[in-house]
Amino acid sequence: MSINQNANASVLPNFRNLGILLRILVIVDGMCLVAALLKTTEPLALMEELIDLSALVQPILILSLLVLAAANTWLHRLRYPYAVATLIAIEFAVTTAVYFFGLSVFTGMGALDRYWIFTVLVTGILIGYFDLRGRALSPALVEARLQALQARIRPHFLFNSITAVLSLIRQDPRRAERALEDLADLYRVLMADNRQLTRIGGEIDLAKQYLSIEQLRLGERLLVEWDAADMPPDALIPPMLLQPLLENAVYHGIEPRSEPGTIHIRIHRHGDRVHILLRNPYRQESERHGGNRMALANIRERLALHFDAEASIKTTATDESYQVHIVIPYLKGGA
């Protein structure tokens, strides 16, 4: 599930989301550091206190995350008050189990109620933090942000596509007419509700339609290679993910060249991740980089809104090529 489907107040976070897990780890470890600092500020004594505290807290933390990830679906079926009560009960049980196991390994662990108090404090802070975060990332706000980001894409696409068709009007009016019909169909898709994830096959069809319009303008200068044999056809991706990347590839990689250039697109699944790689010719002396950075920032923000820390985008530039590598969770879409 994407983050905009989980970002609700009065709902427990998705304990299977990488971003959620990282935030929990940072908050708990930060509280351990604060607890150690309250006892001493001497560097050596602080390190010893932190090690002693972490010896019990870290096993509790790791075991808690495993249990909560396993019980994630069940917890989200409960009403929020019951889910919170169940969560606290789970943390008490995990803390007690780890404490008595630790007694057989370590000495001088202190009283159990000390760790119960720490568990209640940490759990309460985490519940409050994710509740506030859920209000800040409510579906209405996230969807509004997604719509705003989506709206930035459409004018560029329309301008470039109309420019491609205009170049044909005098040379080949019939072909230009067909291209306008394709453009109308394509823009109808762009104007649809694009806040939710969409099947990857539809995005590829949209990308191919866009490239066919660009080829009207660029002719044989634009070559395209698709490698999608290992693509999961039921994968879900954010809408309009491929088209802005291809638009950048055409504008920055093909247009400045007088000779033909090839855009390579590879989509494949590796484990529970879908990889999208796009490579195009590149010239470092090109001055057309501002729009490229804005488009990548747009995509990076949309990936964060949908997937939080579970998605990534990486760019690599060499003397001859520019590559964008996107990794997203493999989420299956219905038929």
Image: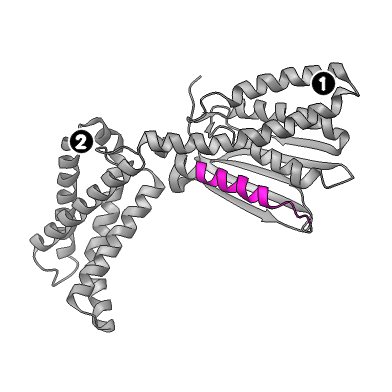
Q: Position of residue 195 (x, y in %)?
A: 48, 31
Q: Quadrant of residue 135?
A: top left
Q: CA distance from mark 2 to mark 1?
A: 58 Å
299 inside magenta stretch:
yes
Front-lying residue, 154 or 251: 154
**Image-based side of 225 in relation to 62, left or right:** right
**In the rendered image, is residue 330 in sight?**
no
202 inside magenta stretch:
no
Amino acid, disc 2: Tyr
Q: Which residue is mark 1?
A: 176
Q: Quadrant of residue 215?
A: top right
Q: Which mark is residue 80?
A: 2
**Image-based side of 211 in relation to 50, left or right:** right
Q: Main secondary structure of the magenta part?
A: helix
* Placement of 139 over or under 293, stated as above or below: above
Q: Position of residue 279 (x, y in %)?
A: 72, 46
> Which residue occupies 57% across, 31% down?
232
> Which residue occupies 48% across, 33% down?
331
Amino acid, disc 1: Ala
> Which residue occupies 13% across, 72% down?
108
> Which residue occupies 51% across, 37% down?
148
Q: Which mark is residue 123?
A: none
Comes first in the chain, label 2 or label 1: 2
Q: Circles 2 and 1: CB distance less than 8 Å?
A: no
* Placement of 316 over or under 240, stated as above or below: below
Secondary structure at badge 2 equals helix
Bounds of the magenta span?
A: 286-302
Q: Quadrant of residue 71?
A: top left
Q: Mark 2 against mark 1, which lies toward the viewer?
A: 1
Judged from this view, the residue extending furthest toward the right is 171
